[in-house]
Amino acid sequence: MKRKLLSKPNRVEDKIFFAVSKAAGYSSFVIIGMILIFLSIRAWPAFESQGVIDFTFGTFWDNSLTPPVFHIGPMVWGSLLIATLAVTMAVPMAISIAYFIEFLAPKFIAKIATVIVDLLAAIPSVVIGLWGLGIFSPVGAGWAQMLNESLSGIFPFLSNSAGTFLRSPFIAAVVLAVMIVPLISSVTREMFSQIDDELIKGALALGGTRESVLRRVILPTSAGGILGGVLLALGRAMGETVAIFFVLNLTYDRYNFFNFLEPVGGNIASLILAKFGEAAPIEVEALLAAGVVLFVITLIINALASYIVQKAQPWRKD
């Protein structure tokens, strides 16, 4: 339950602190609103000429036509697909890392592992992208080929008719997972560290195994914080630009719904990066409109996640 001040601050120092804190809290809403208004004003001509539905869900992009056609449907779906795959890969690894550091590793190893994880979180995305392009892509293509040859007969979404496994959503998702694992792991580790040791020892004393205590005690107790870390990671995954641009083949004319081993994909942020440098004014408007769509999608995801957290933790009252 949220705690409220029983009385207003009386001292000058408290009043100043209260005012600054309140201004900082409301400033986030103001900044977000100003960004959305600015993008919407600049992007409105593109929405008006293309149509909001056609622009968001269409499958064509060509600035040489008269009038030009700008649709970002494959980019929208590709952003959601790659971010979902990345989070699906990253969450089990991040929880495992946090559990090892907090409950299994000796103290000196835990300190070293914590520093390494925090350093990984600070690596710039361009460095991760170059690593993905020059080092991981051939390895990831080998993994993709192995999955295709072994399991495509059972799971059709692992098929590949292109003959190459490079620059696919699968490789992009693995690169993104590497980027967001440290973020989720850091938040999860902090949540695990706040759990009362007596609660865990009591569960073990009652006959619980390490696995059952993790599943029935640790994860339910820290679920809200872990979900918050996942949301932060999902936001970064949805807005990632350079790393995806290096390892993904952007395709504008068709959706790649589930065949994530195919070298066909999309990403809104990478689209903006690929087109912005040489775009004419009318195309810049379309790219800003793509930014508005990405902004709205991110807000919707965060709102849904907040609703899920409240439903999963009914003791949290507004």
Image (cartoon, rainbow, N blue to C red):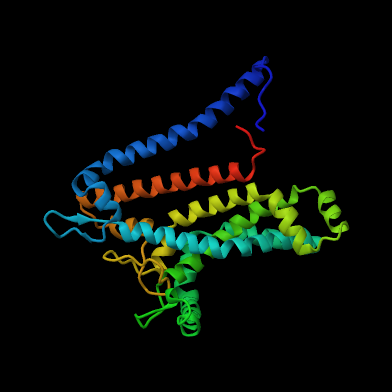
Q: Is residue 114 shown left or right of residue 126?
A: right
Q: Position of residue 208 (x, y in %)?
A: 82, 60
Q: Is residue 270 above or below residue 194?
A: below
Picture quadrant of residue 106? bottom right
Q: Is residue 198 shown left or right of residue 52?
A: right
Q: How many numbered badges does the structure rendering display?
A: 0
Q: Position of residue 290 (x, y in %)?
A: 32, 51
Residue found farthest to the bottom: 149
Q: Is residue 148 above or below residue 21?
A: below
Q: State the quadrant of the N terminus.
A: top right
Picture quadrant of residue 160? bottom left
Q: Is residue 111 visible?
A: no
The residue depicted at 36 percent of the width and 67 percent of the height is: 256
For the residue pair 287 and 173, the one nearer the viewer reads as 173
Q: Position of residue 100 (x, y in %)?
A: 73, 63
The residue depicted at 54 percent of the width and 31 percent of the height is: 25
Q: Is residue 64 visible?
A: yes
The residue depicted at 32 percent of the width and 65 percent of the height is: 255
Residue found farthest to the top: 10
Q: Is residue 231 above or below residue 252?
A: above
Residue found farthest to the right: 205
Q: State the quadrant of the C terminus.
A: top right
Q: Is residue 186 shown left or right of residue 242?
A: right
Residue found farthest to the front: 154
The residue depicted at 48 percent of the width and 82 percent of the height is: 142
Q: Position of residue 191 (x, y in %)?
A: 69, 49
